[in-house]
């Protein structure tokens, strides 16, 4: 699967500056405390860049930013990029151990600590001393733009290095796919450690749109407030992890008489599995465009996209076709392409590929390979297949070599089946390293008040026999736990 087009040779700052010159007085950022025009945002960022330039060490610098969603954080991002450096976001909601790990692993030259609820209040600290080199306030398409750390749900977080040209190419494609115009209003509710924030910020500022900054906090925890912001500011574009689409639909259903979210034009989600029954429920509640995206952080935010329309598999929502300048390969264990309809491992190539993992040369070499000694591919360890319409379906993550590709497909179907049951609030089948499968389930209390967990387990085991899936253990939990971005936090779930 290949989708190619010419890519931009510009930088994020040059594209942003074009909008500043085009719409100097237009409002770029809105928060509870202030509104900032494109011109003012540029001036503030420029002033910070001069201040940072006195500390930095040239184009290879990394600058860490610690803080929650705020206008100051976005000023800091732009100011860092203006110096030719790259930003490393650190969410203060992360455990202190994780924050310390990121600082020790990335070895940033500078740390900017943004004080909560204080306008333009930050502390800049130089962390590493190096010989000063010739400096200039400039950036190139090949400069690093950011280093984002993975969630660490499957081990220590890894810092992923993304170049400016990769983001520019991606944003250019998405502007056309979403049909974004300067009249759109985007809600910024993703944490900065999640690459959805990259799309929210730069799609907005490069398109001349308005960015509404949601209050600090985990995406799940502030979902009700985000809904209020959508109505208050007439938001047209919302990014939301698919695991939260169900909660989103419940809020809309509960406030149906208030005609909430009527300004929305598009809902975009990726990073987790989208349940078919949740999509169908939302489509009945809101007549808008729905986009389901797939792609690891290692390939700049997303790699494929599907505008959710037409008939879908009752168990799996397709993740569509590759984005421009992206190629998705489905290969078997010998790196041979699989046949149409067969399941293969997903390998990705194209302009969006990361440089690799910061300060981890061996891991980079292992995961970013040369295909036939020519094409550079990223081994996602995800499984997928092309359906009869030629659309990519995400099957699951290859967690254990003891299971076959077909086993993972059966697990995906079984998980979707469980989630679609009326008595189930949320369900997840977790494959352990030894190949055993644990079922985590939260239930709607009213519907299951008279049913014991033992009885429910018997019912579910019988039903799942149709999918040839054997569950080692059923674990019933009061509710699911989520990361700041809205991903299911399996590590937290295991501690319940």
Image (spheres, grey):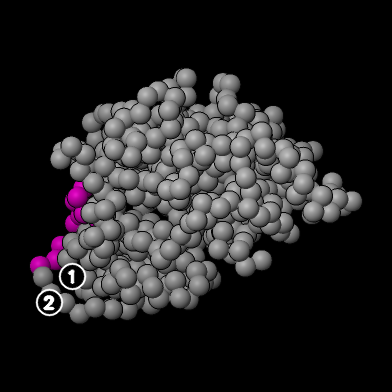
Q: Tag on residue 287?
A: none
Crowding near pointer 2: few (<14 within 10 Å), some, many (20+)?
few
Which mark sits nearer the N-terminus, 2 or 1? 1
Residue at position x 43%, y 32% in the image: 343
Q: Which residue is mark 1?
A: 57
Query: Which stretch appears magenta?
Result: 134-144
What residue is shown at x 50% (from left), y 31% (from top)? Answer: 318
Quarter of the figure that contains the C terminus: bottom right
- Quarter of the image for residue 90 reads bottom left
Task: Please provide percent x and percent y for residue 253.
Answer: 75, 40
**What kind of element bears circle 2?**
loop
Question: With 281 as the anchor, is 134 left or right in this view?
Answer: left
Q: Do the CB atoms of the residues marked 2 and 1 lie less than 8 Å apart?
A: yes
User: Residue 270, image x and y in percent?
Assistant: 49, 43
Q: Is residue 93 visible?
A: yes
- Is 476 or 193 nearer to us in this picture? 476
- On whether residue 136 falls in the magenta region, the answer is yes
**Residue 79 visible at all:** no
How busy is the neighbourhood of tag 1: few (under 14 within 10 Å), some, or many (20 plus)?
many
Q: Which residue does the numbered mark 2 point to in the structure image?
A: 131
Above or below for 183 versus 432: above
Residue 354 in percent (x, y) is at 28, 50
Q: Quadrant of residue 361?
A: bottom left
Tag 1's secondary structure? Answer: loop
User: On the picture, is 188 further left or further right than 426?
Assistant: left
Q: Residue furthest right?
A: 450
């Amino acid at each position: 699967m290949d989708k190619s087009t010419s890519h931009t040779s510009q930088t994020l700052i040059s594209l942003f500056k074009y909008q500043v010159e085009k719409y100097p007085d237009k409002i770029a950022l809105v928060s509870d405390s202030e509104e900032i025009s494109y011109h003012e945002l540029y001036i503030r960022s420029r002033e910070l860049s001069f201040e940072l330039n006195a500390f930095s060490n040239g184009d290879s610098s990394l600058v860490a930013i610690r803080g929650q969603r705020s206008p100051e954080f976005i000023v800091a991002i732009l100011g860092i990029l203006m110096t030719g450096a790259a930003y490393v976001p650190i969410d203060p909601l992360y455990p202190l151990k994780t924050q310390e790990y990121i600082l020790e692993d990335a070895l940033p030259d500078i740390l900017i600590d943004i004080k909560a609820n204080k306008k333009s209040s930050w502390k800049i600290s130089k962390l590493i001393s190096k010989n000063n080199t010739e400096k200039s306030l400039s950036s190139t398409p090949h400069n690093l733009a950011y280093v984002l750390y993975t969630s660490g749900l499957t081990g220590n977080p890894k810092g992923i290095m993304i170049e400016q040209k990769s983001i520019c190419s991606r944003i250019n494609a998405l502007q056309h796919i979403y049909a974004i115009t300067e009249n759109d209003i985007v809600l910024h509710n993703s944490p900065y450690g999640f690459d959805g924030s990259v799309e929210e910020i730069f799609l907005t500022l490069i398109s001349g749109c308005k960015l509404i900054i949601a209050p600090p906090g985990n995406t799940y925890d502030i979902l009700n407030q985000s809904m209020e912001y959508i109505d208050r500011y007439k938001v047209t574009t919302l990014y939301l992890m698919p695991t939260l689409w169900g909660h989103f639909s419940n809020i809309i259903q509960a406030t149906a008489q208030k005609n909430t979210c009527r300004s929305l034009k598009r809902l975009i989600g990726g990073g987790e599995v989208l349940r078919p029954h949740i999509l169908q429920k939302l489509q009945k509640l809101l007549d808008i465009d729905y986009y389901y995206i797939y792609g690891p952080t290692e390939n700049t935010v997303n790699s494929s996209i599907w505008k959710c329309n037409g008939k879908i598999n009752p168990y799996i929502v397709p993740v569509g076709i590759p984005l421009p300048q992206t190629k998705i390969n489905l290969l078997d264990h010998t790196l041979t392409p699989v046949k149409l309809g067969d399941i293969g491992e997903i390998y990705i190539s194209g302009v969006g590929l990361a440089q690799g993992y910061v300060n981890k040369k061996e891991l980079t070499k292992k995961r970013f390979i040369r295909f036939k000694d020519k094409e550079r591919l990223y081994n996602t360890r995800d499984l997928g297949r092309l359906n009869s319409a030629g659309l990519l379906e995400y099957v699951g993550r290859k967690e254990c070599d003891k299971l076959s590709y077909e086993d993972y497909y059966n697990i995906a179907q079984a998980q979707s089946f469980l989630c679609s049951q009326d008595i189930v609030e949320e369900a997840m089948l977790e494959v352990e390293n030894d190949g055993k499968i644990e079922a985590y389930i939260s239930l709607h209390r009213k519907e299951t008040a008279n049913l014991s967990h033992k009885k429910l387990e018997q019912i579910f085991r019988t039903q799942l026999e149709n999918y040839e899936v054997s569950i080692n253990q059923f674990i019933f939990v009061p509710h699911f736990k989520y990361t700041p971005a809205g991903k299911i936090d399996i590590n937290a779930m295991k501690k319940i």
